[in-house]
Amino acid sequence: MSSSSSSSSPSCPKKMITLKSSDGETFEIEEIAALQSKTLESMIDENCASTPVPLPNITGKILAKVVEYCTKHAEVGADAESLRAWDAEFVSVDHPTLFDYILAANFLEIPTLLNLACQSVADMVKGKTPDEIHKIFNIKSTFTPEEEEELRRENQWAFD
Amino acid sequence: MAETTVHGAVRRESSGDDRRNRAKRNRTLPPLSPGDLITAMPDAVIHHIFSFLPLKDVVKTSALSKRWHSAWTTTAHLVFDDVLPCNPDDTYSPDFPSLVDSVLIRCTSPTVKRFHITNFEYDEALHPKLDLWLRFAEERRVEDLRLCLHQPKVHYKLPRFLYCLSRLVRLEVRGCCFSLGTAVRWPCLKVLSIRYAEMSDDILEGIVRGSPVLESLELHNCRSIKNIVIDSTSVKELILDNGWLSNFEKIWAPHLLSLRVLGVWRLHSVFRLDDVSSLVEAELDFSVSGDGIGHDLLKELLEKLCGVSTITIGGWCLQVLSTLEMEGVSSPLSKCQNLILRTPVGQCELLGIAYILRSSQCLEKLVIHLTRSCVSKLKLDEESIQRFNFHEDLLCSRKGNFQCLAKHLKSVEIIDFACGFESKHLLALIKFLVGDALALEKMIIKANLRAQHVQKLVRVADICQLHGVSRNVLSYRRASQNAEVIFDYPLEEVSFEKHLRKILNSKRG
């Protein structure tokens, strides 16, 4: 298999910033990878990122993965196809984790991760009947059968 | 979803509904069932997920639960596609205009980012209705508008208000006509695609003038444009696709960076590139019907494009270059550094490749995207076919002329090898390049096994053949000591099967 050659680091160390999860874990991330988050980017611009950045609504487990995602996507010279495959692996997780990714990407404003995770959810919904969607996402239907019948009639073209 | 939306929706619902719903207004909604994570997502996220779904699926969410009942009405992406219904036994299939009306009347989002109407079977009687739909889009400050009419007998005349859309960023129209008289004002428009439209030089000029940040312009079968004059510095890309009805005469665009000429053309005369002095990238992937025109056009284009550093050439054009090579036409020298070919590599293309290699004296990178046989093959007579019938040494006999091989060619990529590895001409080309490129650093061969034709390759015979060919390629004599030949798929039998199985499983799962 082809090997990718990584450039050796120059004499000056890479700039890192520290992130702190809701459960107190700290994570280091290269500044260049952190720039993928618009939230972190504006913090870096305004010099607020020198002390650990508290992220009270992201747990350590999820933050670790988000750091992994940003670091991978900041790599130079990765070819598009292998990155796509890596992305597909990244979102093959259980639903709670997937939704946590979405919330984290939404909060940190990481458009690539948000698109990736939302597309993943959309793929689960596409072409399914409401009953199937109920099962996949544990949604409880609160309609009576008559209400549901009326609903389907309202937009029948969508339900055929 | 956030409480405000749910309450707001309930209020809107009950205003027109029966007593039953009005009574519910004051009742608190039932709690979410545990594990129902999607309903708890913020509105912005739900909308984002909607933007990846076809409209049908978005509307279906109304039946999920009371909280979801009106979520779809706030979607900002409205994509209406007038395709034939797949179920002919449908007892209730509303006609397309009624369907669009019924959705638009429910939409409450103040901004509709995307508004698409495609494949629309339009006739004159629907003119006022289409005007109304576009009014809706205009009022909701649309950013991405697409209006594609399916072979209309009479083109739809775009209403005046459409010429002044302050938020429009992308516009695609097909089967419409523009008119002079209203000044175009599209201050945010970046991407414009005009297909099968009645146009004129003045209208085009007015459009470019009224779109100060326009970056990409695509003209697809536009009649009545003779001169394409773009003096705007913002337009970076011009795409000319399908000129079945066109009769261009010249292109004048001194600030243009990228030019693409694609599709099928029928020309009576060659069009000229009067000024494209800033071009860095050009793509010539077209075919021309009409005797001899193709040759003259290609000669003219290559001459004017000699300063462009990245050039892409398609299969039909390459075949024309093969005939030029046979006729002994001298190739204009070019400064091309990156050459991309989208073509099969067979008998009719090899000489064309020789032609272009000879003219590109500074070539550093060559990429070949292997495709299946060209759709519009050059019409060759018996004599020409005889002349094309040659053996491997033909390339070698011309090799003295390939300057780029002596000094510059560093990288070669062959993409979609699985699509063409049986061609002896392709193998001859690879052997030639590896054996004569003195500065070669890397030759990367990608098989693109994840694509559709993975299923076909699974036959054991095919795997063995691909292996055999790949191992052969590795054994070719190399002119450059540093040259690496890299395959992006494993070459050992065992790991290859595992690799394929992994791909097939991921496709199934």
Image (spheres, grey):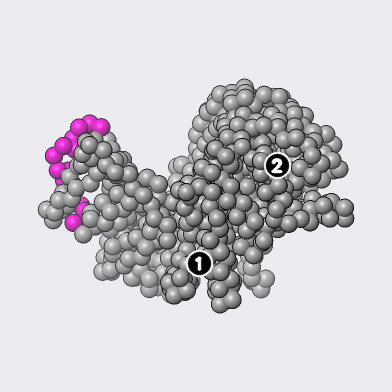
Q: Residue at x 60, y 32 (%)?
A: B335
Which residue does the numbered mark 2 point to in the structure image? B355
Chain ID of residue with mark 1: A
Q: Residue at x 52, y 60 (%)?
A: B474
The quarter of the rendered structure image containing the N terminus of chain B is bottom left
Instruction: Please tell me whether mark 2 sits on a helix, a strand or a loop.
Output: helix
| Residue furthest out toward the bottom | B460
Instruction: Return the x and y of residue B71 as percentages of the image width and height.
Output: 41, 56
Tell which of A82 and B230 is nearer to you.
Answer: A82
Asked if residue A50 lies in the magenta stretch, the reply is: yes
Instruction: Return the x and y of residue B390 as percentages of the image width and height.
Output: 76, 55
Name the dominant secondary structure of the magenta segment.
loop
Instruction: Return the x and y of residue A42 as percentages of the image width and height.
Output: 27, 35
Q: Residue at x 62, y 24 (%)?
A: B277
| Residue furthest out toward the left | A24
Q: Residue at x 26, y 69 (%)?
A: B34
Image vertical order of residue B372 relative to residue B86, above or below: above
Which residue does the numbered mark 1 point to in the structure image? A127
Q: Which residues are magenta?
A: A45-60
Asked if residue B250 lies in the magenta stretch, the reply is: no
The label number, if any, that marks residue B274 in the structure image: none
Image vertical order of residue B127 relative to residue B183, above or below: below
